Image (spheres, rainbow, N blue to C red):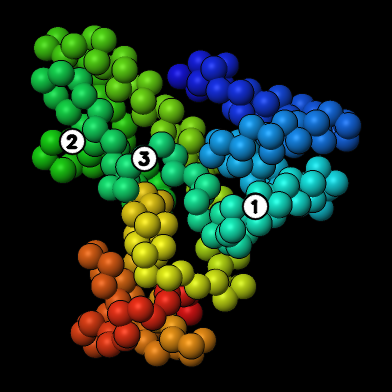
Amino acid sequence: STRSSASTDPAACCAARSAGWIRGSTWGEVAVDVLRAIGTRSALRALGRIADRWATWAIGRRAAEALGAIARRRGLTQAQLADRILPDAGLPPSGQRILDFGPRQFTARLTPALELQVVDAAGAVRKGLPRRAKADVPERVAAARGALKEVEAALRGARPAVIAHLERALAAGGRWAPPDFRAFVLDHPLLARAAPSLVWGRYADGALVAAGLLDGAGTLRGLDGEPAAAAPDAGWGLV
């Protein structure tokens, strides 16, 4: 559960407590420094949340400075580090989670609007998980309901972070090398769902050489629906 993971993960525990320390600048700075020292992915994600939420506060600036220092130490830009720590709501690249009742299975899946949708084995959309039937396995039903609640809670935090990430990339003219585009956009459960609704471009030597929409396979297609021609090593970016 969220409570148990927070109690066993030092970064999650520190991040949870930091919310109550924000107004106390000394304790808030201690929380940032502890997260920086822990240095795990969950710790860096917590620093990112602090930097975004309290961007105009001293603690937000301190968190941003910590992320900048960590990026430099790892030989990355801040945008590249942000790619690597972007929240994924605990979902695999498919953006789906199987919820097993025993004889019945349901799937929680992300929509292009980054909303969570529950569908049954026939593909019919449901408002949520159904009541337990006599043939269902009680332990599995309880586990499935718990898993769905965890994903829903994680998604509430991940969704605004992903939207802000895309907005920053657009404003800064961010670019992804082809391997990074595959790893951190097409294989990211939230970004992959949002990407087809955005206009993307291929860039070579800083110049836009092709633009269009992504299809389900991650191929860039022009307005005519045909694959857009571009050098295979051309970078990717939002248009």
Residue 104 percent coordinates (x, y): 14, 24
| Residue at x-position 57% and y-position 16% | 7
Look at mark 2 in the image and give the residue it sits on: 120
Q: Is residue 154 left or right of residue 141?
A: right
> Residue 103's image quarter?
top left
Q: Quadrant of the N terminus?
A: top left
Q: Is residue 84 left or right of residue 214?
A: right
- Viewer-proximal residue among 178 and 101: 178
In this rendering, which labeled residue sits more in front, label 3 or label 1?
A: 1
Query: Looking at the image, is 76 positioned above or below residue 26?
Result: below
Circle 3 crowding by C-alpha within 10 Å: few under 14, some 14–19, many from 20: some
| Residue at x-position 36% and y-position 40% | 91
In this rendering, which labeled residue sits more in front, label 3 or label 2?
A: 3
Residue 114 percent coordinates (x, y): 41, 51
Look at mark 3 in the image and give the residue it sits on: 91
Q: Which numbered disc, 1 or 2, marks the residue that appears first in the sequence? A: 1
User: Label 3, label 1: how many angstroms apart (C-alpha)?
Assistant: 29 Å
Q: Amino acid at mark 3?
A: Leu
User: Label 1, label 2: how many angstroms apart (C-alpha)?
Assistant: 47 Å
User: Could you say whether the residue bearing mark 2 is in a helix, strand or loop?
Assistant: loop
